[in-house]
Amino acid sequence: MTEILWHGRGGQGAFTAARILGAAYAMKSENNFALAFPSFGPERRGAPIRAFTKLSERQVSDRSEISKADYSIFLDDTLFSENAFSELKDNGIILINSKKQFSDKRIKAIDGYKISEEFLKVPIVNTIMLGAFSVFYDGISEDDIERAISENMPEKIRQKNISAMKAAGKELFK
Amino acid sequence: MARKFLSGNEAFAEGIRLARPEVISAYPITPQTIVVERLSEMVEDGSLNSEFIHVESEHSALSCAMGASAVGARAFTATSSQGLLYMAECLVYASGGRFPIVMMNANRSTALPWNIYGDQRDSLALLDSGWIQAYAENAQEALDLALMSYYIAENKNVSTPFMANLDGFVLTHTYEAVDVPEQDAADKFLPPFETENKLDLSKPKNMAFSAGPASNYIFKYKEHLGLLNAAAVINEAEEKFYKIFGRKYPGLIEKYLTDDAEYILITLGSISGLVKDVTDELREKGGKVGMIRIRYMRPFPNKEIAETVKNAKAAAVLEKDISFGNEGTVFTNVNSALKKSGVNIPVSDHIGGLGGQDISRADIENIFKNMKKGLSDVNFIGIGGDRP
């Protein structure tokens, strides 16, 4: 099972990303299973929230929150601290939206705001981080994510999110 | 059949859409709200032809569903927690009136202290209200239960309202892949609602009347028989469901690795998934452990449970409920089942998940470990025994 832990602030779309990733993976075939859920409870715009995606080739029956992740994704680098490593598996990867450089090899940074400014005109990077994730995780392709965005996002914002998601991949391969 | 990525609430709403209810009465409450929101969208976009009535309280929601059922309409409502307790008066009206209404309850803690997270004290507090009570484990089962619920409730030998329970948040708000049947297959499974228990100008009759001491007990006895009859209809519904949709359900209980199990954990609802995982892990280490998932609390699977645990060395109940001053209600029911069948093994009770308390793998492993001690007592996860 691959466990993805999403960190964001209320309004940044962390749970939407968690859900689109689950859909992208689970819709690939009848042998792909996923669970996606937010940290439950009252939500406030701007407050830190977590969301969870579990991907597996077997039915996922453990519905509890992820305590150690394979991938920990930060939509906002103000939420990142050294504590992030205690929630990471041994070979885990941290993906972070940041203009900063990180020397730690476990951290992969991408300047998501640069891409969101160009494609979305709002500082929201959830689909951009999905694009970045597809670069580091073999189980999912840009096409899978494109299909899930098409099926799960309102028509008005679909195409630009797909473009932003693909731009993330290009940026990382630069 | 379309494969979709849905939350438990959304999956249940899809199942209700396929059942074509003619009246939906709704009052929102967390974590149930999304099921009625989705249904209202379906009515709005024309994918469901139903009268959607936004009422002013839960008491009215069920009263409204009863009025609809009393003119022969298929009716649906949904609630949770305090909302369910507020409509308690109407629950016994609906069951006593033999109105086969279906209601989804999103299991949630009851006040005080105020809390919106999941436990099962709300529905179990109303176990005696004369409703069929089912508990789903995952979103697929939730959808399938929605469709099967009307088949079971409306059978004329049953004529009993049906409460389908989904654990708040962990099931209602968690997304997973679900197969959504086509409408024509659903129609093949579930015929339109027909009943003689309705107001009909061409056949006037008295309904929802008074019955004094001379006859009241006969109505109550028949109500009891209706619920008992549901057991056979549940099996019939599941067989027909399997033939049409290819998904198999195991009746009142699900047995997991119980055949040779020496230690059996009995539970219900979505925590069963984690219990199965722990059971698998303990099996790999050679532990002879198994699980029973109670799918229906009413009618209660007395024989099924006794038959399954009779060769075990010990059993335990894990439930998100406490009947203050005594023990968990599921435990009371399980013990009665074993006693009636002469099964005399130690059974302990484990109360967990109250107000959304996390139940961990380690907690479940501990329950299995402690079963070996053969103690019959009441334990609170995270605290300990109730008699320090």
Image (cartoon, helix red, strand yellow):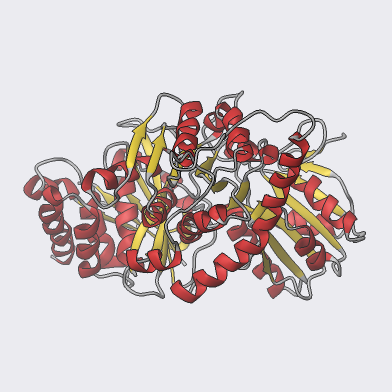
Residue B202 in view (yes/no) = yes
Front residue of B75/A162: it is B75
Q: Residue at x 56, y 26 (%)?
A: B86
* Residue A11, above or below B58: below
Q: Is residue A4 visible?
A: no
Which x, y percent locates residue B278?
65, 63
Residue beneath the point at 73% across and 67% down: B290
Viewed as shown, does residue B237 lie left or right of A70?
right
Left or right, A78 with reference to B45? right
Residue at 31% over, 72% down: A28
Give whichever of A61, A137 is nearer the camera.
A61
Image quarter of residue B6: bottom left
Please tell me how many numbered marks the rendered image carries.
0
Quarter that holds the C terminus of chain B = top right
x and y percent of residue A37 in the render? 42, 50
Question: Which image quarter: residue B311?
Answer: bottom right
Left or right of A174, for residue B180: right
* Residue toward you, B17 or B376: B17
- Name the spot of residue A32 as percent of width and height, x first: 40, 71
- Residues A124 and B94: in front is B94
Q: Position of residue B269 (x, y in %)?
A: 60, 52
- Establish if B380 lies above or below B279: above
Q: Which quadrant holds the N terminus of chain B?
A: bottom left
Q: Is residue B40 above or below residue B27?
A: below
